[in-house]
């Protein structure tokens, strides 16, 4: 094989660089973690989480957050707005475009009008969901809500964090005033988890929650974000003999094992494979499982078995409820696949009577043993793929 021509070498280098860039920028940003490094924004960070804006910010690929320090947030909280109105005000401080510190001083004609997450909700009438950004003299940059008579309420203070062109977090001096954003907002209808289940083929699981008292823990976590995995009625019917053998405390732990204390959309589950904690996690006992996916199929792997998400009962943030095809069995309560399928020491006719009965479900297949892979994703990840391609290209260059 003839050696590659000089013009081929730059092409190979660019190809490798492209693959490497794609693999290293695929991780989603996390506004909560970014702000956690800066205690002066702790109140702002808290209310982004409480209003569920944090999860919405994290799902966006291109975003700019106008952060408010604790003093600015204190002035906003003095207005005693409801949590739902407060969400609208904070939404006005999240721009659905990327503005890094350099871009602020490179705005065409010195001023720009950009939309916000408040405008994206559809709750902002007219131009009230837009923010005016103006490059002022002396290196200052002003910000103001479009429905505030063109007044620039705040100025740029500093850049907190920037990941071009993914997320930019910029501190501004004070809250942006908007009569529409601060208008009283009605509280959304109360979400009734067990009622939702009873109407969607998961009545048996909902009844178990109520009978055990575990429903109280689920309901307490809805406002802060909750993901529930609900085995369907036929699945519960087949599982009841095992369930009845559990103690009352074990039943509660098993049921809590079917909830994650944060809102996780199907898109999020598909893009964030790995170990997750549950409502049953208490420190001493992990009660975790691994989320994995293969194309459009999302599975939940414990050390005992594997369940598959088969549908969505309800998706209304902060609550999402999925249907699953098996009861999730935690290793803390049931024997692992490895123990259940350990080689027998003897083929004696008395072996079956002497061997301990396995709590692993009869339908568990050998593939469930792959739950030992704590990393969640099988196959090559982005960085390993880069190394393979790099080795191949180096081999071609040396031939």
Image (spheres, rainbow, N blue to C red):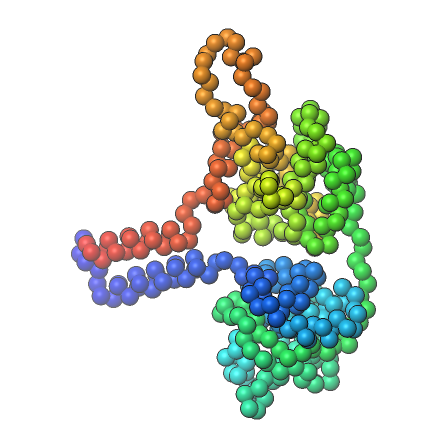
Question: Left or right: 166 with respect to 174?
Answer: left
Would residue 117 be visible to someone looking at this image?
no
Q: Measured along the vertical axis of the image, is residue 278 above or below residue 22?
A: above
Classify the position of the C terminus by image quarter: bottom left
Tell me if residue 14 comes above or below residue 201 in the rendering: below
Q: Position of residue 114 (x, y in %)?
A: 62, 76
* Residue 313 figure quarter: top right
Residue 263 as seen in the image, left or right of residue 17: right
Which of the 4 image quarters holds residue 312? top right
Q: Looking at the picture, how far across and down is residue 165, in whole percent?
A: 50, 69
Farthest residue to the left: give it.
Answer: 2
Q: Eyeballing the image, is 253 above or below 147?
A: above
- Which residue is painted at 20% across and 56% down in the image? 398
Residue 240 picture quarter: top right
Q: What residue do we see at 70% from left, 60% from top?
A: 50
Residue 319 drawn above or below residue 210: below
Expressed as whole percent of the image width and height from the top left, the position of residue 100 reads 53, 75
In the image, what residue occupies the spot 76% across and 64% down?
A: 83
């Amino acid at each position: 094989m003839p050696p590659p021509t000089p013009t081929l070498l730059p092409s190979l280098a660019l190809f490798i660089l492209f693959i490497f860039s794609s693999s290293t920028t695929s991780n989603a940003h996390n506004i909560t973690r970014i702000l956690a490094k800066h205690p002066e924004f702790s109140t702002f960070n808290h209310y982004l989480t409480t209003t569920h804006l944090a999860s919405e910010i994290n799902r966006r690929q291109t975003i700019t957050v106008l952060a408010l320090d604790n003093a600015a947030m204190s002035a906003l909280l003095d207005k005693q707005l409801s949590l739902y109105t407060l969400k609208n005000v904070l939404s006005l401080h999240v721009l659905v475009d990327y503005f890094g510190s350099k871009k602020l001083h490179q705005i065409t004609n010195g001023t720009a009008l950009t939309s916000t997450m408040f405008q994206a909700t559809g709750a902002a009438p007219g131009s009230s969901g837009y923010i005016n950004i103006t490059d002022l003299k002396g290196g200052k940059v002003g910000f103001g809500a479009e429905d505030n008579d063109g007044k620039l309420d705040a100025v740029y203070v500093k850049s907190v964090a920037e990941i071009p062109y993914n997320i930019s977090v910029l501190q501004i001096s004070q809250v942006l005033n908007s009569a529409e954003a601060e208008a009283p907002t009605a509280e959304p209808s109360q979400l009734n988890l067990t009622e939702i289940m009873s109407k969607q083929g998961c009545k048996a699981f909902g009844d178990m929650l109520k009978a055990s008292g575990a429903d109280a823990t689920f309901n307490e976590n809805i406002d802060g974000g909750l993901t529930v995995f609900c085995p369907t009625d036929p699945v519960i019917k087949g599982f009841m003999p095992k369930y009845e053998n559990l103690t009352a405390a074990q039943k509660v732990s098993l049921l809590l094992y079917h909830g994650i204390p944060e809102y996780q959309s199907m898109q999020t589950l598909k893009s964030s494979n790995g170990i997750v904690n549950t409502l049953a996690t208490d420190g001493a006992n992990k009660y975790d499982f691994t989320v994995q996916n293969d194309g459009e199929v999302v599975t939940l792997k414990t050390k005992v078995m594997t369940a598959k998400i088969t549908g969505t009962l309800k998706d209304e943030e902060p609550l999402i409820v999925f249907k699953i095809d098996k009861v999730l069995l935690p290793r803390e309560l049931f024997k692992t696949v490895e123990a259940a399928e350990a080689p027998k020491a003897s083929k004696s006719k008395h072996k079956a009577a002497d061997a301990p009965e396995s709590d692993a479900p009869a339908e568990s297949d050998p593939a469930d043993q792959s739950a030992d892979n704590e990393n969640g994703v099988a196959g090559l990840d982005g960085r390993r793929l880069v190394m393979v391609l790099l080795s191949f290209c180096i081999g071609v260059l040396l031939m």
